Image (cartoon, rainbow, N blue to C red):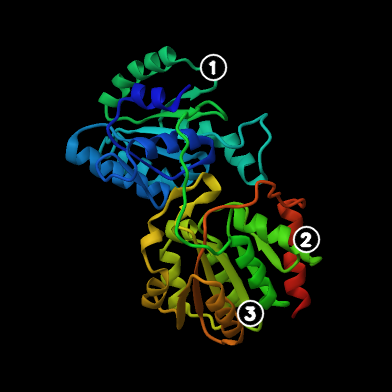
Amino acid sequence: MRAEDFVNVIGSEFFTGVPDSQLKALCDYLMFRYGIDERHHVVAANEGNCVGIASGYYLATGKIPVVYMQNSGEGNAINPIASLLSDEVYAIPMIFVIGWRGEPGIHDEPQHVYQGKITLKLLEDMDITYCVVDSDTSKAELQHTMEGFQTILAKGKSVALVVRKNALINEKDIKYSNPYSLCRETVINKILDHTGNDFIISTTGKISRELYELRQARGEGHQNDFLTVGSMGHSSSIALGVAVNRPEKKIWCIDGDGAMLMHMGAVAVIGSLHPHNLIHIVLNNGSHETVGGMPTVASNRNLADIAKACGYEYAVSVENEADLNRILREVQQRKELTFVEIKCAIGSRKDLGRPAEKPKESKEDFMGALNMSC
C-alpha cells in the first residue's frame, strides 16, 4: 500500500513518533507532506515521549492522534499507555502504528527476535485492539478496519496497526543531509588510533557495525568492544556501570545523538557520579540514520554544553579533522569525566556488514577481557 493512501485512510491530522526502518516509507511520506511541524508531525526523543505529546494533542483538540514506532519501542511506551491512556484512568484514545521487526518466521537481527515474538501479546495485555497490515492489504480493507476502530476509539480505548515488512511503499524520494564533512567511519577509525587496550561500549545501529568492521580491517580482535545491538539509548548507562566498577581501566562510550536524546537523564546520572575513567563520545549527525535518516533535534543543540551543565568535568564539540585529532590526543591523557561531541555527515557504506558472532559470544569475550586485566 502507498504510504500516502495509508495516511489518508487513517485520517488523523497529527502524527508523532520515533523512526523505524520498517516504517521508512511512512516516515519519508510524513516528512514530504509535513516536515517537522508542531501542529502535524513531531519526531520525538523516545516512545514514551510520543505518547505524552499525543496525549497533550488529544487534551487540547479532542482529536485522535497517531503514534508510530518500531515494536522494540513498545516497552518504552507501556507505562504511559497503562497508567495514562487506559480507559480505567484517563481514557485517552490514540492510533498506534507499529513496525513489526522480528516477526516469527521472518529472519531478523538477534535483538529483534524475542521482541517480535511478544509484539502482539503486549498489545493484547494492554487491551489494545490491533490489525496486521501486510503487502496484500488493500486500501478498501484498511478503510473497513478503520471504520471498525471508530467504535473502540470513541470509548477512550487505543488501537494499533502492526505493519509487516514491505507493507508500505513511498513514491517520494527523501534525501537527508547536513553541512558537516566528517565521515562517521573515518571518525571511529581515528578513535581506535587512540584507544589502545582500553574498552569500548558502542551504541545500537551503524556505529557498532562500523566499529566491528573497522576492527576486522585493522586486523584487531573484538574482545575489548561491547556492541550494544539492542536497547537504543542505554549504551552510556552500560558504560557507566563498567567504568565505576573498573576504575583502573579507561572506558570509551561511542554514542549517537538519537541514542543520547532518548534517555538524556542518563547524562545527568553520569555527571553526578563523574567517573574519572569514562570518555563519552557522541557522533552527532542530527539524524536517526540507522532507521532511515529522519532528523533529530540534536542538529541545533550544543550537546557539550548539556554535558557541562550535567557535571561532566570536560566537554567539547568538534566538527573538523584538525580539531578532532588534537582533541582525541588530549582526552586520551585526561583523568576526568570527559564528553566529546563530534559533528558528522549523514551516510554510510552500502556494503556495511553486521557482526558474525552471536551476542552471547561477544559478551563472554568482553567479560573475559575485563577479567584478564584484573
| Near-viewer residue (313 or 30) | 30
Q: Give whichever of 261, 295 is nearer the camera.
A: 295
Q: Amino acid at mark 2?
A: Gln
* Residue in the image at 67% along x and 61% along y: 211
Q: Amino acid at mark 3?
A: Lys
In terms of sequence position, does the residue under pointer 1 or pointer 3 come before the other? 1
Q: Earlier in the sequence, mark 3 or mark 2?
A: 2
Determine whether 234 is above or below 47 in the image.
below
In percent of width and height, residue 53 lies at 30, 46
From the viewer's perspective, is the residue at label 1 or at label 3 nearer? 1
User: What's the distance in space between the residues labelled 3 and 2, CA to CA?
Assistant: 22 Å
Residue 307 visible? The answer is: yes
Q: Earlier in the sequence, mark 1 or mark 2?
A: 1
Q: Crowding near pointer 2: few (<14 within 10 Å), some, many (20+)?
A: few
Kindly indicate the quadrant of the structure image that contains residue 95.
top left
Q: Residue at x 54, y 70 (%)?
A: 281
Query: SS for tag 1?
Result: loop
Question: Residue 345 has which mark?
Answer: none
Q: Secondary structure at mark 3?
A: loop
Residue 212, horizontal then vertical, whole percent: 71, 59
The residue indicated by pointer 2 is 216
Q: Is residue 122 visible?
A: no
Query: Mark 3 = which residue?
Result: 250
Q: CA distance from mark 1 to mark 2?
A: 41 Å
Residue displayed at 75% across by 51% down: 358
Q: Residues within 10 Å of mark 1 (few under 14, many from 20)?
A: few
Residue 136 circle label: 1
